[in-house]
Amino acid sequence: MKTQVAIIGAGPSGLLLGQLLQRQGIDNVILERRSGEYVLGRIRAGVLEQGMVDLLREAGVDERMDAEGLPHDGVELAFDNRRVRIDLAGLTGGKQVMVYGQTEVTRDLMAARQATGGTTLYEVDDVQPHDLDTECPYVTFVDKHGETQRLDCDYVAGCDGYHGVSRRTIPKDRIKEFERIYPFGWLGLLSDTPPVADELIYARHERGFALCSMRSETRSRYYLQVPLEEKVEDWSDERFWEELKRRVPEDVAAKLVTGPSLEKSIAPLRSFVVEPMQYGRLFLVGDAAHIVPPTGAKGLNLAASDVNSLYRLLVKVYHEGRTDLIPNYSRTCLKRIWKAERFSWWMTSMLHKFSDEEDFGSRMQQAELDYVTGSEAGLTTIAENYVGLPYEPLE
């Protein structure tokens, strides 16, 4: 087999890159070790930055998003039993975020790829890139029939996540990892209940952080900060709802509609970045190169900004012969990534409980919240970062 760009991973970043390249006449093959049903079953993010929304429109997969997604002009911070609304649109010149689940983004991209005839090979095993530091890289894998295959290509895009093979292929002396592990996780519950508010509510409470989010007008997603040693099976639906009511303002708790969970899971929180994000003709994209705590709603959106940079780079390579731009990929992506890492770290540090004691850190959290919510400059800082900073140009 031969293609121009081999894409490892059929999550939203791999599918979005494939769709954008396909529309520019750049041939690509996507390899995925899981089944399509498994990929669709992942419960993930649901808040899309303005830049990602625009990129999905450029990819021609915006019809259902625009019909069913929920544009949001604001977001709320809750603390001391009160709520402060951040006017995203008013503070950023009209920019918004879109609430539209990652599962639905993936579904739309899968349908678009099938319609364009792009090749996606699911349930492949033992995927391994080779000769990445030469002009003739290739990828070997075992297909679902047990046959070993070779895919020759010009470039490899590693869109296979934190645990994928792409980053592990790079020699350890050629990359550096930066990481912070947080001492808690998020217990998430998905339910077919109407959201408690029209916009997301990020709540700081002495018992721990809580988030009220949604996937649609009839499906809600809620989160609680819990210790890392907690187990999902110890949290009944009733226990979850009661704890959530304790952590949100009284007027929010009074309106909360509860119901049986569709899914519950605990996600650990970490900040992680690898530099550089490329090795030879391999480019790392999304979670393969960086992880952010979900507090800033940046994970999927950062992957989209990587896709934007790589897509525009490859268009210039194939349409204009601009191979001189290839070394710019990592530097371009990392400028935006570190700013998003800072915002996610800052939001996490400001809103979560780190100690059972009233200490210096908790007083700083309170002072930070009082300042940013009482200052237009502080509110603007949150708004600009939340809707998404501009994509970095390649040149």
Image (cartoon, grey):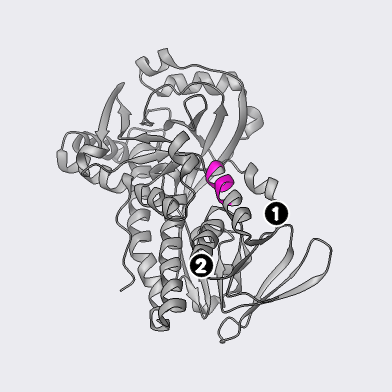
Name the amino acid, label 2: Leu
Q: Position of residue 264 (x, y in %)?
A: 60, 32
**Whether residue 350 is situated above or below residue 121 in the rendered picture:** above
**Residue of label 1:** 34
The magenta segment is 104-109
Secondary structure category for the residue under label 1: loop
Q: Is residue 354 visible?
A: no
Q: In the displayed structure, does residue 8 sit left or right of residue 370?
A: right
- Residue in the foreground of this view, choosing between 364 and 199: 199
- The part of the image, by quadrant, that contains residue 163 is bottom right
Contact? badges 1 and 2 (CB < 8 Å): no
Circle on res. 353: none
Q: In terms of secondary structure, what is the magenta stretch mainly?
A: helix
> Which badge, 1 or 2, is on the more N-terminal residue?
1
Q: Residue at x 44, y 72 (%)?
A: 315
**Residue of label 2:** 284
Q: Quadrant of the C terminus?
A: bottom left
Q: Quadrant of the N terminus?
A: bottom right
Secondary structure category for the residue under label 2: strand
Name the amino acid, label 1: Arg
- Residue in the foreground of this view, choosing between 18 and 80: 18
- Residue in the foreground of this view, choosing between 147 and 266: 147
